[in-house]
Image (spheres, rainbow, N blue to C red):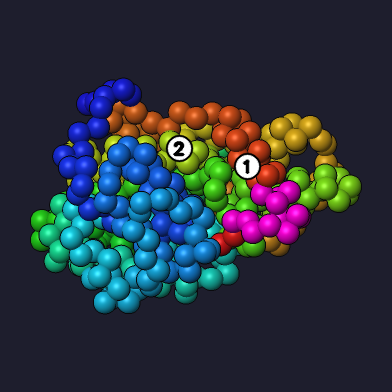
Amino acid sequence: MTSQNTPIDRKLNRDDLILITGAGGFIAGSLVRYFHDLGYTRIRAVDRKPLPDWYQRVDGVECLCMDLSEKEHAIRAAEGAVEVYNLAADMGGMGFIEHFRVECLRSILVNTHLIDAAWRAGAKRYFFSSSACAYNTGLQKDPNVRALKESDAYPAMSERGYGWEKLISEMFCQEYWAERGLETHIARFHNIYGPNGTWFGGREKAPAAMCRKVLEAVDSGNLAIEIWGDGTQTRSFCFIEDCVLGIDRIMHCDDLIATPINLGSSELISINDLVTMVEEIAGVKLARSYDLGAPKGVAGRNSDNTMIQRILGWEPKTPLRTGMEKTYAWIATQFADRKAGKRVVKD
């Protein structure tokens, strides 16, 4: 077992080519910056969004606009890559996941083409970003849910659309290791949030949505907020800085080859309490209403971090309050910029 401060042995040269897909988005864009800031000089960033719409652009990084659900684009993207990080997927918060299941399922094409292209290109390692949505929904019917451990994905009963896409793509990763020898690594993300992410438009997740709603209420003078569901739903939320460090640690751990593992905080909170937290950060109190017919997802979901603690001697550590303060401050700046007519981040 490693410890919290154990250096990461990446077995990478500074000029080895690192491919990061979905790089126009929130998590992958942050991962590009993370590796760039570590001093890696050859990073290829790929996303299907036009370059002006990328959340982050990092100087010195090769940025390509390509749809990786097309086989030839996946082959081009993987050329010469030593490591491949697949974070490309059509996804968003519950409003998107529940209404666009076909689009979520189509992300299977991205992983299918990309993992084969990576294997044919001779990549040493392949990372797949899975999700806690892969877990059996029968275990998530109570807000006081026990934390989900990795084995809880089976017997399989994932969330329709997005969850099943993640589960079948995990299988691809495991079989490419077992049958073809491509070293694969799999992290099940639990609600990643933070600056430089989607905060309006329908794809945003709960932390960003709550920040935006509070800002809108304060700005309009209508001190009220609508909450999807009855507010008793519980979740854990993982800060982006913990996420990218966790990806790095998981990708470069020999004990985690072809082995799905949770990457999330174990700090459980209800949606009602999350709203209260944002109100306290903003210094305001809002009247609450509840839309019981809106998408609300499972009743409760939390990350069991026993496995990641045992194998890596590490787990996400940023307290939710700390991460939410940073997120609110960033969204407040974005909100003001949009009001002033400036271009802002939107998926």
Residue that carries the numbered disc 1 in the rendered image: 330
Residue 67: x and y in percent read 38, 72
- Whether residue 186 is in magenta: the answer is no
* Cα gap from disc 1 to disc 2, whole angstroms: 14 Å
Residue 340: x and y in percent read 75, 55
Q: Nearer the viewer, residue 45 or 314?
A: 45
Label 2 is placed on what type of residue? Glu
Asked if 21 appears above or below 300 in the picture, the reply is: below
Tell me the residue at 22%/26% (across/down). Answer: 1
From the viewer's perspective, is 198 left or right of 285?
A: left
Q: Secondary structure at mark 2?
A: helix
Residue furthest out toward the right: 221
Residue 314: x and y in percent read 34, 28
Label 1 is placed on what type of residue? Trp
Asked if 209 appears above or below 96 in the picture, the reply is: above
Tell me the residue at 43%/36% (across/down). Answer: 242
| Label 1: few (<14), some (14–19) or many (≥20) C-alpha neighbours in 10 Å | some
Residue that carries the numbered disc 2 in the rendered image: 241
- The answer to whether residue 224 is visible is no
Q: Which residues, given as a range, are shown in magenta? A: 334-345
| Label 2: few (<14), some (14–19) or many (≥20) C-alpha neighbours in 10 Å | many
Cβ–Cβ below 8 Å for labels 1 and 2? Answer: no
Tell me the residue at 30%/73% (across/down). Answer: 73
From the viewer's perspective, is 32 left or right of 181?
A: right
